[in-house]
Image (cartoon, helix red, strand yellow):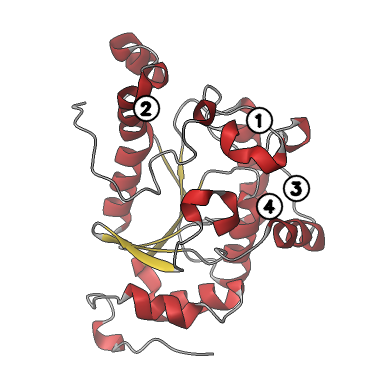
């Protein structure tokens, strides 16, 4: 296996060159990418999961190839009941080092103070993302001490992801995507080969998964219309944009 050109004695503080690392990961298989990253960067890594429709693939790969990587799950407080059930099912099977983070403001308090933010246009959506996803994830990165964030994003999921490299810099965090180049067929094959359970809502016409108020069933070829009434696909966690001007 290839190795990163890092000095092990200084690995905890070395700057990562996203372009070079992306080039290094590109020819490898997903499991090899994870092993290489963990062997060379260790405690600097953290993974995230939404326990969405295809999350089991990335989680199983971590379980098989780099099980010590902590996995952060952001519980927004507005997930489908079936998602919470899926969390229990997968974590029981895969024995993940799961770290659950929640917003600093409860869903009841949020609605009492600001109403249904997701119904208040673009600004409301940004405020909602800041409260329920961005702030908890920033807290997770700080508390785990990680500066390299692994995610199961894939290029085929959305037109906003087509040009993503395997590794990129977003603000102060380096993000790496071990299954970025996987097609839907490869994901399905992995599910079948390893007997992984599907999200309970997969059989009910859902092709993406998020909060109950902003996710709806859709045709597979029209997945981008299934989130936020078709106005956007990304929830805010995976966009390199400025922090919304909103005080908690």
Is mark 3 in CB contact (under 8 Å) with mark 4?
Answer: yes
State whether residue 101 is above or below residue 172: above
Classify residue 222 as left or right of residue 211. Answer: right
Which residue is identified by label 4? Answer: 93
Decide: few, some or many residues near mark 3? Use Cα within 10 Å; few <14, some 14-19, many ≥20: some
Residue 45 in percent (x, y) is at: 39, 65
Number of the label disc, if any, that sits on residue 125: 2
Classify residue 9 as left or right of residue 185. Answer: left
- Choose the circle earlier in sequence order: 3 or 1: 1
- Choose the circle earlier in sequence order: 4 or 1: 1
Residue nearer the viewer, 88 or 23: 23
Is mark 4 in CB contact (under 8 Å) with mark 1?
Answer: no
Q: CA distance from mark 2 to mark 1?
A: 23 Å
Query: The residue tagged with tag 2: helix, strand or loop?
Result: helix
Residue 129 in percent (x, y) is at: 36, 33
Is mark 2 in CB contact (under 8 Å) with mark 1?
Answer: no
Badge nearest the viewer, 2 or 4: 2
Decide: few, some or many residues near mark 4? Use Cα within 10 Å; few <14, some 14-19, many ≥20: few
Which residue is identified by label 1? Answer: 82
Which residue is identified by label 3? Answer: 197
* Residue drawn 58% across the image and 50% down it: 157
Query: The residue tagged with tag 1: helix, strand or loop?
Result: helix
* Residue drawn 52% across the image and 77% down it: 26
């Amino acid at each position: 296996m290839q190795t990163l050109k890092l000095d092990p004695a200084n690995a905890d503080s070395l700057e990562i060159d996203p372009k070079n690392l992306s080039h290094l990961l590109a020819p490898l298989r997903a499991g090899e990418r994870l092993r290489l990253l963990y062997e060379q960067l260790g405690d600097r890594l953290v993974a995230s999961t939404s326990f969405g429709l295809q999350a089991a693939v990335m989680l199983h790969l971590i379980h098989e190839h780099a099980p010590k990587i902590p996995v952060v799950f952001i519980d927004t407080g507005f997930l489908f009941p079936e998602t919470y059930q899926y969390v229990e099912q997968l974590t029981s099977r895969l024995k993940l080092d799961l770290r659950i983070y929640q917003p600093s403001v409860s869903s009841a308090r949020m609605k009492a103070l600001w109403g249904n933010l997701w119904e208040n246009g673009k600004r409301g959506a940004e405020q909602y993302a800041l409260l329920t996803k961005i702030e908890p994830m920033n807290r997770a990165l700080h508390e785990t001490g990680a500066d390299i964030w692994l995610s199961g994003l894939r290029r085929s999921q959305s037109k906003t992801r087509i040009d993503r490299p395997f590794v990129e810099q977003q603000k102060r965090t380096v993000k790496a995507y071990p299954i970025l180049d996987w097609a839907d067929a490869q994901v399905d094959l992995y599910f079948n080969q390893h007997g992984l359970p599907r999200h309970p809502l997969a059989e009910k016409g859902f092709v993406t998964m998020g909060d109950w108020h902003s996710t709806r069933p859709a045709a597979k070829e029209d997945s981008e219309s299934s989130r936020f009434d078709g106005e956007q696909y990304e929830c805010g966690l995976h966009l390199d944009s400025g922090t919304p001007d909103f005080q908690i």
